[in-house]
Image (spheres, coloured by chain):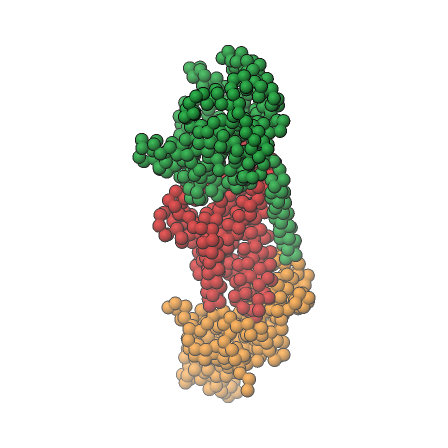
Amino acid sequence: MTARIPLVAQWSFSQLLFSPRTAGMAILATTPVLMALVYRAAVALELAAQTSSFGVFSILTAAVSLPFVAPMLTLFYASGVVIDDAEAGTLHYFLTRPFARRDLLVGKMLGNLMIVMFLFVPPFVLCYYLTLAGSGWQELGSRFPTLVRDLMAASLGIFAYSGLFSLAGTVLKRPLLFGLFFVFGWQAAASIVPGAIRYLTVTHYMHSLMPHESFQSSLAGLIGQRSSGLEAVVALLAIGTATHALAVWIFTKKEL
Amino acid sequence: MKKSRWILTLAIGAVVAGLGIGAIAYVGSSGVEAQSPAPPATMEWMPAGASVVGHVDLTSLFNSPFREAWEQALEARGSSGELAEFRETTGLDPLNDFYRLSFAVVTSDDPSDSDSNASAPRGRPTPENWGVSIQGAFDAPSLLTKLREFADVETEDYQGTTIYYPVRRWDDAGDEDAAPVGIGDKPALAFLGSDTLVMGDRHYIRQMLDTGQGRAPSAVAALNQNWGEDTFLNDTFWISAAPEQGFGGVLPQGGQIPPIQSLAISGRLDADVALRARGLAANLDSAIKLAEVVRGFVALGSLQQGGNADIRSVLDSVQIDQFENAVELSLSVPYETLERLSAHADNPADDN
Amino acid sequence: MNPPVVELCAVSRWYGNVLGLSRVDLTFESGVTALLGPNGAGKSTLLKLVTGLLRPSSGTVSVFGAAPFANPDVHRKLGLVPEEEEFQARVNASDWLEYLMRLHGFDENAARERARKALHDVGLESASKRRVTSFSRGMKQRLRIAQAMAHDPEILVLDEPLTGLDPVGRHEVIDWIRDWGARGKSVLVSSHILHEVELMTREVVLMTAGKVMASGNIHEIRRLIDAHPHHILISTPEPRRLAGRLLDQVGLHSISFSEELQQVKLETREPDRFYELLANYVLEEEGTIHEVSSPDDNLEAVFHYLVE
């Protein structure tokens, strides 16, 4: 029934991997790595203290990787889930093949998630080792649960973002603009406004899962706005699942 | 697609390897922690439930660059004679014969003190019980002989260990009610093996013996439980306080500052002096608030440091991290900077 | 009794306020059928309805008895050559076709073999490892045709398939289409290059402004021409005499002559009667006629008559 999904996912990943967009996104994805390298150089030149290594990793995670790199990567891929093929003139070839439209979109969304994770996770792990290199085996080990927790928060966040931006890509003509507004306009504002509006953002739940401090999380923390870990996990899964499902449903009904 | 498959496989492999190394390090570091480092031997005698527990690795301290400075300071203050007299009287050289020292204090809130400040939730903490454990090169018979020159010494056999009670000098002879204020019971001491001396009030020394002989819970277990894997027990010096155990008036509570469940200050004397202060908040929100408050104090300090380059460099080295419920302030200061700051404290006029 | 290959019943299709197709009733059987009409006539809309890319606003479309919109059962039997548009698959031709065949349900080996054969059939075998983005227009068009034919569909839908092809390529494609029809398959092809369509089929549907103007065999359509002025061009050394002779004839719509070109051009609503008169002029009045031609014999003329 869904045999085409892995095929479509693999094809989408392959197409995206060698696209000019990925070259640009790779620069974005490796920004934290470059910053970590700068820190390492600063330590080598005795301009920074080795003792602050975990703090540097925290800052890179809480201020760069999770709130900026993850949504941007997801936006630039997920928003093109339909438009990419429409603009490349390849969509009609797929839509007239004998398999469910649902499988096509699910496969493409999976391919998008694969490329986002491909670009996000290795640099993130590398960043961990670069910042904590020199702090010793014990420090690497003792901080490892944080890395795992960050990766989980990032993965859930990327899943939720992917659903939202895929839905936008299925419904809207300019999903990229919507995504930029959502990330930098709506979320930035809603996450620091007291009240229930914060529940309508992805960052709120991601920050609730992050063990690190960041500008938004600390501000949210000051006004007592944090969800429990379980709530955050459930919310991110629910957002991701619902928006992905809605995107698929619309795609199966949509004339293209 | 084959090429992309290979690249994806390679990336997954790299990530798995990265996570695998981290996991091995995690398991390894957990294992290391389980086996060692063993807590300092003097900590074995510290009972659980103390409000304040501390430890000093005297060997490290006296072999650090500070030693020379202290000797010079003693010389300058004319205290070297007193030191020599102490050596002669006790047969002990404080700078060489003491290896490590641990201490514990149990406090209670003094209700009378809370009357003076109605808004304070608790009164001033009053030491109720105390205990010190010292490891060093002791000659117990010689020390007891010296002790008997100054006081009558009563003895008690407690679970196979002899406890000595010096009664004349410290007990304000003839007046049983005139025990030192705040110390509570009469002070006592015991020699444990050839290298350990424990001191404390009568009640607490029994608790210490029970703890050391495994009949009562240890402060080490409580500390490990409180601070988790990030232990400081083998740092050069440290002190840990638990406000909920009667130390509420000392640690900041209420108001703008989030409640702190535990506080630990520790230091290591390596190439530089590395100091860490850690606070354990009640929850994540409190920890974030606490980090903000601490950061605010540091920023305030930076503004008020008056252009002193050493203070500025110290403040610049301050790192404030918050992780889950814990907030940690760490800084690293070169010895030379500390010496200059110390000199500056003695002669503030020299600054400009 | 088997249902028609394609059947449209009172099908209308709106794009917002714009009518793309207006109450179209059509049936297509096996063989080649051409849709003819100017831009905006509704040909592409009709083909998208047949291939299930669009749904009718009203009426019903069925292909092999089933609604084609997002219907894998229909798509299994369908091959589509979409209208020429941006085509930027960032892979080589072989991989592209192989992927589409895998999507069609063939296993890896079968897909590879079908891709290879289809590329061979359209003359792209030597370019099979070249990236599609480097292909010329004509090569891309051949690749479109290859992917539509590779799985041997029951019905082949081609939207302007001759666009971008060189003369040799056009003839090749026309031959493939005719062969496909001759094998009992259904081919639905749209085009505005009328003389080439004549080479493909005699079954045409003439469309304009979203409506079907006429449909059927080209000869049946031809009879409709009689309702329109019929153009006739006569080469004669005595154009003035001939024009004078024809001037007062019944049904003459317009007439002009050129002494220099030795030509007479005329439009008549009664072509049969005119040819009879012309025969009399030559036989009884000893008139001289070098050549008589009528653009109305060309399909293009039919198209113009009907859409103007």
Quadrant placement of the C terminus of chain C: bottom left
Residue at x 57% of width, y 41% of height:
A142
Q: Can residue B186 be spotted in the picture?
A: yes
Residue at x 47% of width, y 65% of height:
A249
Where residue A170 appears, as percent x and y from the top left, is: 47, 61
B116 or C37: nearer the eye?
B116
A64 or B278: nearer the eye?
B278
Q: Can residue A19 be spotted in the picture?
A: no
Where residue C91 appears, as percent x and y from the top left, is: 61, 58
Q: Which chain is red?
A: A
B49 or C271: nearer the eye?
B49
B65 or B90: nearer the eye?
B90
Instruction: Indicate the colour of chain B.
Output: green
Residue at x 53% of width, y 59% of height:
A109
Quadrant placement of the N terminus of chain C: bottom right
Give the vertical position of B116 relative to C200 (above or below).
above
Instruction: Indicate the colour of chain C.
Output: orange
The residue at the far front in this view is B174
Where residue C20 appears, as percent x and y from the top left, is: 42, 71
Q: Quadrant of residue C268?
A: bottom left
Where residue B203 appears, as percent x and y from the top left, is: 49, 32
Q: Quadrant of residue B303?
A: top left
Residue at x 47% of width, y 22% of height:
B170
